Amino acid sequence: MSGVKCTNNIPSKRIQKHGFARRVLSILLAISLGCLTGCGNESVQLPYEANAAFMASQADTADGFAKNLSIVNDNVGTAALPLEGITTGALICINDNSVLYAKDVHKSMYPASLTKVLTALVALKYGKQDDVLTASENVTKLESGAQRINLKPGDSMTLDQALRILLMYSANDVAIMIAEHYGGSVEGFAELMNEEAKSLGATDSNYVNANGLNDAEHFVSTYDLYLIFQEACKYNLFREIISMPNYSTVYQDKDGKEISFEKQTTNPYLNGNATAPNNVTVLGGKTGTTAAAGHCLILLCNDTAGKEYIAIILQAESGDLLKSGMTDMLGLIQ
């Protein structure tokens, strides 16, 4: 993927908005738990225009967050492993929620194609594998350089095929086709994405599209990605797809003519471009890259005892730093 280059910081109005949301959540939690906790590291003043209507709009967010209280609020292991050239990262065992590493995990970031994890989760929740999806003219409206399979209006494939191409090859035009089928439009699907994220307690996120191409209002935190990816991994089909080193299939154009697709995964640990430590097996994952988001990667791994881990890096300055940083982080698994 490619995107429009911009500053690394999320616009201040978004930090202010979501900082306020976190304060509201903390206050609500304090009432029930008898203590005041925050899910972010930055201190943010409440905007003067805050009112009861906005507070009410955050109530459902608080409900979801209460079910998934943050298991990490501070940096963990960054003194020994600073991960230079990488903005944020995490390594968490999903068997016992133990945090092996955490670096600025509540910072809102551009997620690039890691967005597609939530796209797949929502499609799995609302769709069936044999649903037939048909491309509209919108699949051709992508910025130059964006990853695609060059869908044309009228091309069709099943959801099963679409999800495999979406996650394994990171096709942005396929993401649009999925979004329009299940949301009626990209905007409608983004609403479903935000509802799902909110239900999981992902309070540092806002989604406006299904592919992760850059938008100033499209952002997520590393911790939120952990929650979303963990939920997606509950689907056997998702696990199967993210573990695929390659995929070939045939779909149809508007006249029923067959179109062949055959590609290798973008995941460096599955395509031979990166090697995990000897005691770690990479089960699968998802890559993402734009000019604004940098190089991003989320992995599902296990150790020799079978315990599973989610490893995330956002905004590495280069592909080499992404791979070396991820391998160093995976080295923390004993």
Image: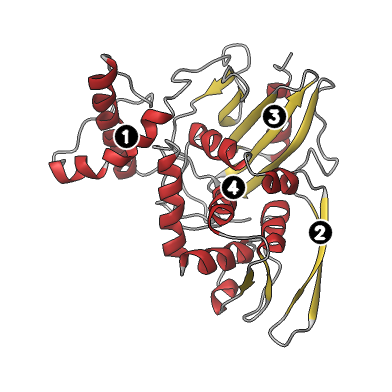
Element at label 2: strand
Please report contact status of discs 2 and 3: CB closer than 8 Å, yes or no.
Answer: no
Please state if 23 lies on the left or on the right of 219 as rendered: left
First in sequence: mark 2 vs mark 1 = 1
Q: Mark 3 sits on what residue?
A: 326
Q: Amino acid at mark 2?
A: Lys
Quarter of the image that includes the C terminus: top right
Q: Secondary structure at mark 3?
A: helix
- 201, 328: nearer the viewer: 201
Nearer to me, 182 or 46: 182
Q: Earlier in the sequence, mark 3 or mark 4?
A: 4
Residue where numbered disc 2 is placed:
263
Q: Which is closer to the viewer, label 4 or label 1?
A: 1
Dot placed on the residue nearer the N-terminal end, 4 or 1 = 1
Residue underneath mark 4 = 117
Residue drawn at 53 percent across, 38 percent down:
225
What secondary structure is found at the residue carrying circle 4? helix
Q: Residues within 10 Å of mark 2 (few under 14, many from 20)?
A: some
Residue 263 in sight in this render = yes
In-image side of 29 versus 192 (left or right): left
Percent x, y for residue 54?
20, 44
- Identity, as a three-letter code, of the amino acid under mark 4: Val
Colour scheme of the picture: secondary structure
Precedes in sequence: disc 3 or disc 1: 1
Mark 4 Cα within 10 Å, few/some/many (few <14, many 20+)?
Answer: many
Quadrant location of residue 267?
Answer: top right
Q: Which residue is mark 1?
A: 62
First along the sequence among labels 2 and 3: 2
